[in-house]
Image (cartoon, grey):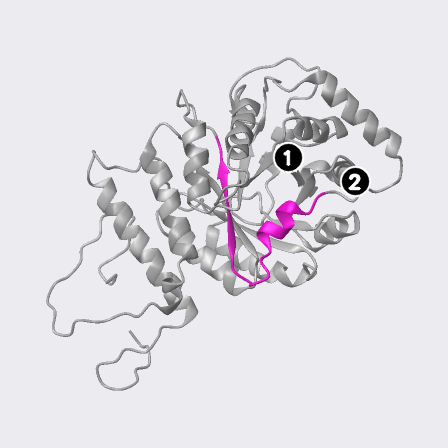
């Protein structure tokens, strides 16, 4: 409605913004259809985050203050999105060796790897996408099958939350092992990113010992140690992915040597507000870095619209956070791969809408899945 038209009977191409709205509506209808059928349901979809003020979460900071550290007692469960218990399956002797390597490097800055940076920032300008796996309570998880599905879906990187419970690190190692089987094949292995409560050099060393290609370092959580942690990652040959929430954190991350800059707001603000803030912060990321935006996944369609806004703002990569949390139901994997295929489809850039004039049919959408003005 309101779109300009060319010759009679030939609809004009919708603007970029309207295009993503239509794609989001399409996903919503498909999800609603699946949800209405118990045999084909896609469990776990939630609405956008609740309202809130600001883009920082004091709850996360408070939770992280009591998070698990080496030598602390181990519990189970999750609190405030941070670790309260981890079962270390990584060889501690190897971790100690890596820590010593960082100490011996002194003030020297390692060159690090650029494998992930090259995979995310295409010379052609084509967008790339990352999927975050956050373990839920369901057991057992078929991580290997999910890893294969994400690779076939052309996810460029897989972020694994290692802080959920005692199996978090084990999940990451399984992703690493499965992705390594694709070396020399097409599609090749997706990079696996350790996303945990990184606060010490030993934490970075543990990520390296586990085989991660990169380690996510929250500039907010790491605080004054952020620069040291980025340097440690470079010395150990893995790529630091700096998670930032404002201009100052972008500056610190870049000055410390990080090339992967991930705008990720730990906040309860509504997704539309976080999307607006992400677009505003894009100009602060240097051109020689990989600009990565974060969009909350599992919204049942709106994530497609927000991802479209990030691409329009010239972000190189979009990470769908909390996009996959249950590998026991293959429908979750199918939805993730559907979103990836939609975002990567060249046809979506040329989508046209045909309106059947005179139609008396009115679409009645289920609650939470759009309204009667939605026509696809």
Q: State whether residue 160 appears in this view.
A: yes
Q: On the rendered structure, is 217 left or right of 341?
A: right
Does dot 2 land on a helix, a strand or a loop? helix
Q: Position of residue 109 (x, y in %)?
A: 83, 42
Query: What span is in magenta?
Result: 113-134
Disc assigned to residue 221? none
Q: Nearer the viewer, mark 2 or mark 1?
A: 2
Residue extending farthest to the front is 184
Q: Position of residue 313 (x, y in %)?
A: 55, 64
Q: In the rendered image of this protein, does residue 204 appear above or below residue 374?
A: above
Q: CA distance from mark 2 to mark 1?
A: 23 Å
- Give the quarter of the figure containing the N terminus: bottom left
Picture quadrant where residue 70 is located: top right
Q: Residue at x 54, y 28 (%)?
A: 177
Disc on the earlier residue, 2 or 1: 1
| Picture residue at 35% right of the left edge, 75% below the top | 13
Category of crowding for the residue at label 2, using alpha-carbon neighbours closer than 10 angstroms: few (below 14), some (14–19), many (at least 20):
many
Please indicate whether residue 118 sits to the left or right of residue 76 in the image.
right
Residue 299 seen from this side: no
- Is 213 placed left or right of 372 in the picture? right
Res. 153 image quadrant: top left
* Percent coordinates x, y for residue 347 in the rendering: 36, 64
Q: Is residue 90 magenta?
A: no
The tag on residue 231 is: 2
Q: Position of residue 12 (x, y in %)?
A: 32, 78
The number of callouts visible is: 2
Q: Look at the image and tell me in which quarter the C terminus lies.
A: bottom left
Residue labelled with disc 1 = 61
């Amino acid at each position: 409605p309101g779109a300009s038209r060319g010759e009679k009977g030939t609809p004009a191409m919708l603007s970029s913004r309207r295009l993503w709205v239509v794609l989001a509506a399409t996903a919503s209808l498909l999800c609603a259809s699946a949800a209405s059928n118990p045999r084909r349901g896609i469990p776990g979809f939630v609405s956008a985050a609740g309202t809130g003020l600001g883009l920082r979460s004091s709850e996360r900071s408070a939770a992280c203050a009591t998070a698990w550290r080496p030598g602390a007692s181990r519990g189970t469960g999750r609190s405030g999105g941070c670790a309260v218990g981890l079962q270390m399956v990584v060889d501690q002797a190897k971790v100690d060796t890596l820590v010593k390597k960082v100490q011996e490097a002194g003030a020297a800055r390692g060159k690090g790897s650029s494998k992930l940076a090259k995979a995310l920032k295409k010379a052609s300008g084509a967008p790339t996408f990352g999927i975050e796996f956050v373990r839920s309570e369901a057991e057992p998880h078929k991580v290997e099958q999910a890893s294969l599905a994400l690779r076939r879906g052309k996810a460029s990187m897989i972020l694994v939350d290692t802080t959920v419970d005692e199996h978090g690190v084990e999940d990451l190692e399984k992703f690493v092992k499965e992705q390594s089987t694709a070396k020399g094949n097409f599609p090749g292995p997706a990079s696996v990113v350790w996303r945990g409560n990184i606060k010490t050099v030993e934490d970075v060393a543990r990520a390296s010992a586990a085989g991660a290609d990169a380690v996510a370092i929250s500039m907010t959580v790491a605080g004054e140690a952020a620069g040291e942690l980025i340097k440690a990652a470079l010395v150990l040959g893995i790529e630091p992915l700096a998670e930032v929430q404002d201009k100052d954190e972008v500056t610190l991350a870049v000055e410390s040597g990080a090339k992967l800059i991930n705008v990720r707001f730990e906040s309860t603000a509504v997704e539309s507000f976080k999307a607006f803030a992400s677009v505003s912060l894009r100009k602060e990321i240097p051109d020689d870095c990989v600009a990565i935006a974060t969009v909350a996944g599992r919204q049942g369609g709106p994530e497609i619209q927000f991802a479209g806004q990030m691409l329009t703002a010239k972000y190189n990569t979009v990470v769908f956070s909390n996009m996959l949390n249950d590998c026991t139901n293959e429908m979750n994997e199918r939805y993730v791969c559907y979103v990836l295929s939609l975002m990567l489809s060249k046809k979506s850039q040329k989508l046209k809408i045909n309106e059947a004039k005179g139609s008396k049919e009115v679409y009645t959408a289920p609650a939470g899945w759009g309204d009667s003005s939605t026509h696809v």
